Image: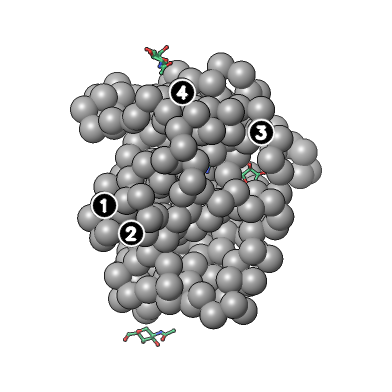
Amino acid sequence: MKKIVIFLSLLYYAFGVSTVSKSFRQHSDPIISYCTRLTVKPTELEEKITNDTINNDNWFVMLGAPEVLQLGKNFIQLIGAKKALDIGTYTGASAAAWATAMPSDGKVLSMDVSHASLDSIGKPLINQYSDIEKKIDFRLGPALETLDNLINNGESGKWDFCFIDADKVNYKNYYIKCVQLLRSGGVIMVDNALWGGSVVRDQWQSLDTRIIAETNEYISQDNSTNSALINVGDGLHLAFKK
Ligand SMILES: C[S@@+](CC[C@H](N)C(=O)[O-])C[C@H]1O[C@@H](n2cnc3c(N)ncnc32)[C@H](O)[C@@H]1O
Ligand SMILES: *[C@@H]1O[C@H](CO)[C@@H](O)[C@H](O)[C@H]1NC(C)=O
Ligand SMILES: *[C@@H]1O[C@H](CO)[C@@H](O)[C@H](O)[C@H]1NC(C)=O
C-alpha cells in the first residue's frame, strides 16, 4: 500500500501537468517561467550549483527552486538578516543563496544527515568563492539534534531567518524549533508546502503529504506568527514572527 502511494506520488510529481511547480521542471507553466525570468538573478556561483546539480545528480528535483531562493534572499536583505538556519543542505544551493544575500559578517548554519551531494557537487564550487565559503557552517547530523543543541546553548530568539527543506516527517517539529530560535521580526520559509498540489487531494495522501498539510494547519493557527501560504515553486509557507 505504502509503495503504491509513493509510486503514484512520484508519477504525479514527474509527469503531471501542474500549476504547482519549480521553474526548472519541464512541465512548468509558461507563467512560472515568465515570473522567474524577470525576477530571479542568481550569481555565477548560484548558477553553477544549479546547473551542476541538474546535470549530475539523479535527485535534482530536490534542488531549491531558484524563485524560492530569490524570495528568501530578498527577505534576508529586507530584514537585514545576519544569522540564517538552513535545514536540508543537499548540494548547498540554498546555503549559498543565503550567504550571498548577507553582509560579510553573516552566518549560515546548514544542516544535513549526508554530505555526499555537497562534497561531490556544491563544495568544490563554493570553495572557489572564499567570501561565501567563510559565511557557511555545514553541520552533519539530524537537524532536530542540531536545533535542540542551539536551544540548549541559549540561542533562542537570536536567529533572523529559517529555511525548512529537509525530511517532511519532521516539518512541524522544525517549524516549532524555528519559531523558538527566531527573534521577533524573523522570517521562516517552509518549502514544499503544497507538495505538488497533493495537500488538496483527498485520496492517495502519503505520510509526507499528511504531515505537510498538518504543518500548514498548525502554522495557520499559530498566534506567534503571521503567515502567507503562496504558490511559488513547490509551494511556500512564509511565517513572520510577531
Ligand atoms: C530537498 S533537499 C534540500 C535542498 C536544499 N535546501 C536546496 O535548496 O537545494 C533535503 C535534504 O534533507 C536531508 N535530510 C533528510 N533527513 C534529514 C534530517 N533528519 N536532518 C537533516 N537533514 C535531513 C536530505 O539528506 C536532503 O539532502
Ligand atoms: C547554466 O546553464 C544555462 C542553461 O543551459 C546556461 O545558459 C548558463 O550559461 C549556465 N551557467 C553557468 C554559470 O554555467
Ligand atoms: C490564538 O488566538 C485566538 C483568538 O484570539 C484564541 O482563540 C486562541 O485560543 C489562541 N491560541 C493559542 C494557542 O494561544
Instruction: Tell me which label, 4 or 3, sits earlier in the chain.
Output: 4
The mark found on residue 138 in the picture is none
Choose between 110 and 14: the one closer to the eye: 110
Q: Is mark 4 within 8 Å of ligand 2?
A: yes
Helix, strand or loop under label 2: loop
Residue at disc 1, CB closer than 8 Å to ligand 1 = no
Residue 115 location, x and y as percent? 69, 40
Assign a secondary structure to mark 1: helix
Q: Is residue 68 left or right of residue 77?
A: right
Q: How dense is the environment of label 2, judged by Cα within 10 Å: few (below 14), some, or many (20 and up)?
A: many
Mark 4 or mark 2, earlier in chain: 4
Quarter of the image for the N terminus: give it: top right
Amino acid type, callout 3? Asp
- Using residue 32 as the reference point, say whether residue 50 is left or right of it: right
Name the residue rendered at 38%, 78% in the picture.
Answer: 224
- Asked if marks 2 and 1 touch (Cβ < 8 Å), the reply is yes
Residue under numbered circle 1: 77
Tell me the residue at 57%/59% (across/down): 171
Distance (Cα) linking label 1 and label 3: 28 Å
Q: Spatial distance from mark 2 to mark 3, Cα to Cα?
A: 27 Å
Residue tagged 4: 48
Mark with earlier residue (2, 3): 2
* Residue located beneath label 3 in the image: 119
Position of 202 relative to 90 (above/below):
below
Report helix, strand or loop for mark 4. helix
Residue type marked 1: Gln
Q: What x and y, as percent, mark residue 166?
A: 59, 50
Which residue is label 2 attached to?
A: 81
In the rendered image, the vertical position of residue 187 relative to residue 58, given as above or below: below
Measuring from the top left, give residue 146's x and y in whole percent: 64, 64
- For image coordinates 51% across by 75% down, the residue present is 155
